[in-house]
Image (spheres, helix red, strand yellow):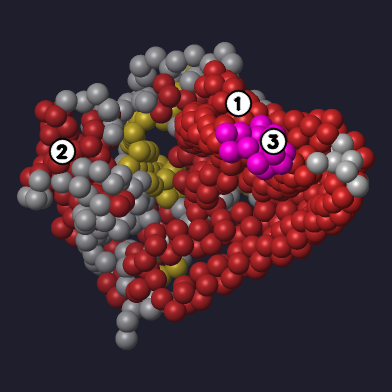
């Protein structure tokens, strides 16, 4: 049974987007802008209130120069104190009402802005957790975090703030333009000569700023990724005394981000004064020509002052639109990175006709399964395996043989390129992922706990579990005693990734979590590899309880942990090369016996008990087969 390449859907969605960006960037820009507006649409009523307040505020702003004209011509011109008082009170009232409507406008815009950011974060996060493991395997955590945090904040300005600025400036521009043309079309013509140059300059600046903004966001994401990696592995950094190396690595990432920011700032610093200079030149020409008109008696002083106010207002509106265009480019540069996530299709998704998987007995079959990575490198080749309900199967083999990949196909973390995996006769691709994984328990080698309490970490196995059920699972996993010894018992915070607990304690909490889930199929991936003898004793006892009555798949490099398996599957270069019981495989001259000899001296050759370690095993515990650690001299 053929399956599409596991990464084809995601690759296709991203390649289509990148192709559109190269061939028709304006189409992509408009599409992204429309998507941004889509986040605003649910709050259109509140936005409408803000726009009404904005319209009133703009009208009041445009009324101020007219009031000043009256003040100059009527009050000062005839030296009338009463008119002076009236005009002054009128201007004060205009500013007071304008302040009130501006407050209403800002309040509603802020609510819409924050709501849009929250919705964006919800949607991106919801999409992220639905993506397949391959997506996260190919990307750094810090880079993803940067997109969900700083990029969305950058988008916030475009979605609400800049849209508001554009609308406000557009209203002001139309109103001021109409008024200056009505007042004196000749002076208006002089003033407007620079507008085409301003528009062209703004468009050029906007294109450059968008490109530089994307570069800045990428470099900041790189710096965030380095920071995340360093802090996540701080124990490794300190154990190798590489603090200075990490300081230099992070410093270089920060400097690259600064260099990108400097290029962006240089562009902004170049174009902003240029636009201002264009307006100053036209404003100076209007002042000179208008002054001569006043001296000639064809224009009153009040009319000239009002015209100059409108000219400044018009210049501010055009400059604001130009700045908004640049800000839009910045935000759209960030939106590209966010929408790349939203446009990424999950490699593994429920089929349209997928149905819930009913309670299972635990029979698992691999039928002619092939799997390869994106680069075409084969990992599994023609795997055929039938595992009966309740059977304990162990996978052994050299590193890179395909053991973990084979396990990952059972809960459908990945799909095979060819063949199928069935559970109780149902292809795992025909059932819903939630119902499938809900009946599979996983205990990994490196247990990852959440930064919450010990009890909540166990309850993660079944979110509706009662306190009594959580404690019962902990007792079955031999975790209850050490949990009760913690400062707050089950309510003790375990720290980031469970850092406050030992490796063995974290592993027992993971086992308790799996027990609480009560799965029909259990996957153990090197569950005792990193434990000391005492911790391993407790964990092995807990695992024995967990394995009872379930179909179990075990991966182990230490062969002593898989002797009691019903069947041992030996993998090499993606093929099943041997299978059978421990005793059967030892009796053969095969790979399993050679691997076993690396860890234990063969009894027939040295007369030792089967479990007695060979001298080289006593000198150094072996890590993945064929790679013994050197003993310290």
Where are the magenta residues, as a range?
A: 61-84
Mark 1, mark 3: which one is toward the viewer? 3
Q: CA distance from mark 2 to mark 1?
A: 65 Å
Instruction: List the residue tagged with mark 3.
Output: 74
Front position in the image: 601 or 468: 468
Q: Residue at x 58, y 38 (%)?
A: 81
For the point 58% across and 49% down, the residue is: 138
Q: Is residue 254 above or below residue 528?
A: below
Residue 74, magenta (yes or no) = yes
Which numbered disc, 2 or 1, marks the residue that appears first in the sequence? 1
Q: Which residue lies under the disc numbered 2?
A: 474
- Say whether disc 1 or disc 3 marks the residue closer to the N-terminus: 1
- The answer to which of marks 3 and 2 sits earlier in the sequence is 3
Apparent side of residue 612 relative to residue 130 in the rendered image (left or right): left
Q: Nearer the viewer, mark 3 or mark 2?
A: 3
In what element is the residue under mark 3? Answer: helix
Q: Is residue 186 visible?
A: yes
Kindly state the secondary structure of the residue where label 1 is placed: helix
Alpha-carbon span between mark 1 and mark 3: 26 Å
Name the residue at 48% across, 20% down: 432
The secondary structure that most of the magenta stretch takes on is: helix
Query: Is residue 570 toward the left or the right of residue 470 in the image?
Result: right
* 56 sits to left or right of 11: left
Spatial CA distance of label 3 from label 2 is 89 Å
Q: Badge 1 is on which residue?
A: 56
Residue 530 placement: quadrant = bottom left
Instruction: Examine the structure image and report whether residue 451 is included in the region drawn in magenta.
Output: no
* Spot occupied by residue 442 in the image (x, y as percentages of width and height): 35, 38
Secondary structure of the residue carrying tag 2 is helix
In depth, the one of 279 and 451 nearer the eye is: 279
- Tell me, yes or no, whether the two marked residues, 3 and 2, touch with CB atoms within 8 Å: no
């Amino acid at each position: 049974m053929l399956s599409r390449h596991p990464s084809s859907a995601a690759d296709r969605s991203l390649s289509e987007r990148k192709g559109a960006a190269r061939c028709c960037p304006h189409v992509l820009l408009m599409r992204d802008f429309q998507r941004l507006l889509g986040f605003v649409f649910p709050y259109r009523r509140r936005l409408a209130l803000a726009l009404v307040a904005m319209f009133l505020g703009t009208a009041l702003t445009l009324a101020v120069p007219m009031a000043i004209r009256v003040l100059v011509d009527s009050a000062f011109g005839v030296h009338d104190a009463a008119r002076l008082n009236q005009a002054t009170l009128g201007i004060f009232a205009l500013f007071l009402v304008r302040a009130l409507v501006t407050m209403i406008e800002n309040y509603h815009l802020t609510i819409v802005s924050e709501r849009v950011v929250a919705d964006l974060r919800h949607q991106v996060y919801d999409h992220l957790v639905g993506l397949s493991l391959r997506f996260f395997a190919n990307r750094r955590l810090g880079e993803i975090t940067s997109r969900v945090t700083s990029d969305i904040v950058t988008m916030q300005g475009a979605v609400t703030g800049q849209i508001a600025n554009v609308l406000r400036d557009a209203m002001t521009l139309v109103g001021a333009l109409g008024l200056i043309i009505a007042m004196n079309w000749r002076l208006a013509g002089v003033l407007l000569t620079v507008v085409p140059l301003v528009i062209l300059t703004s468009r050029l600046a906007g294109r450059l700023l968008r490109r530089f903004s994307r570069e800045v966001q990428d470099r900041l994401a790189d710096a965030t990724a380095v920071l995340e990696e360093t802090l996540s592995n701080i124990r490794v950094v300190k154990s190798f005394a590489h603090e200075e190396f990490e300081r230099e690595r992070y410093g270089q990432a920060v400097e690259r981000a600064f260099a990108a920011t400097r290029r962006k700032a240089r562009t902004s610093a170049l174009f902003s004064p240029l636009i201002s200079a264009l307006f100053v030149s036209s404003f100076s020409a209007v002042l000179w020509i208008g002054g001569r008109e006043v001296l000639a008696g064809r224009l009153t002083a009040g009319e000239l002052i009002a015209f100059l106010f409108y000219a400044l207002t018009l210049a501010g509106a055009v400059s604001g639109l130009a700045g908004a265009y640049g800000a839009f480019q910045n935000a759209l540069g960030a939106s590209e990175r966010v929408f790349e996530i939203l446009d990424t299709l999950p490699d593994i998704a429920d089929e349209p006709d997928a149905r819930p998987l009913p309670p299972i007995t635990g029979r698992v079959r691999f039928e002619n399964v092939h799997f390869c990575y994106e680069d075409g490198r084969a990992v599994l080749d023609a795997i055929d395996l039938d595992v009966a309900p309740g059977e304990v199967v162990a996978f052994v083999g050299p590193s890179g043989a395909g053991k973990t990949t084979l396990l990952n196909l059972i809960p459908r973390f990945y799909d095979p390129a060819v063949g199928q995996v069935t559970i109780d006769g149902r292809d795992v691709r025909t059932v819903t992922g939630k119902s499938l994984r809900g009946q599979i328990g996983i205990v990994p080698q490196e247990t990852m706990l959440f930064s919450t309490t010990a009890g909540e970490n166990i309850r993660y196995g079944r979110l509706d579990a009662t306190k009594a059920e959580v404690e019962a699972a902990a007792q079955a996993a031999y975790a209850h005693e050490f949990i009760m010894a913690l400062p707050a018992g089950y309510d003790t915070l375990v720290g980031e990734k469970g850092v406050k607990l030992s490796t063995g304690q974290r592993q027992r909490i993971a086992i308790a979590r799996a027990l609480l889930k009560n799965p029909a199929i259990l996957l153990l991936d090197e569950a005792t590899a990193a434990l000391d003898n005492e911790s391993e004793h407790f964990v092995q006892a807990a695992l024995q309880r967990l394995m009872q009555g379930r179909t179990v798949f075990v991966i182990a490099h230490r062969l002593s942990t898989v002797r009691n398996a019903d069947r041992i599957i030996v993998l090499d270069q993606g093929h099943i090369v041997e299978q059978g019981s421990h005793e059967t495989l030892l009796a053969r001259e095969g790979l399993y016996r050679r691997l076993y000899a690396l860890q234990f001296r063969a009894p027939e050759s040295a007369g030792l008990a089967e479990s007695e370690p060979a001298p080289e095993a006593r000198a150094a515990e072996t890590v993945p087969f064929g790679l013994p650690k050197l003993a310290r001299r």
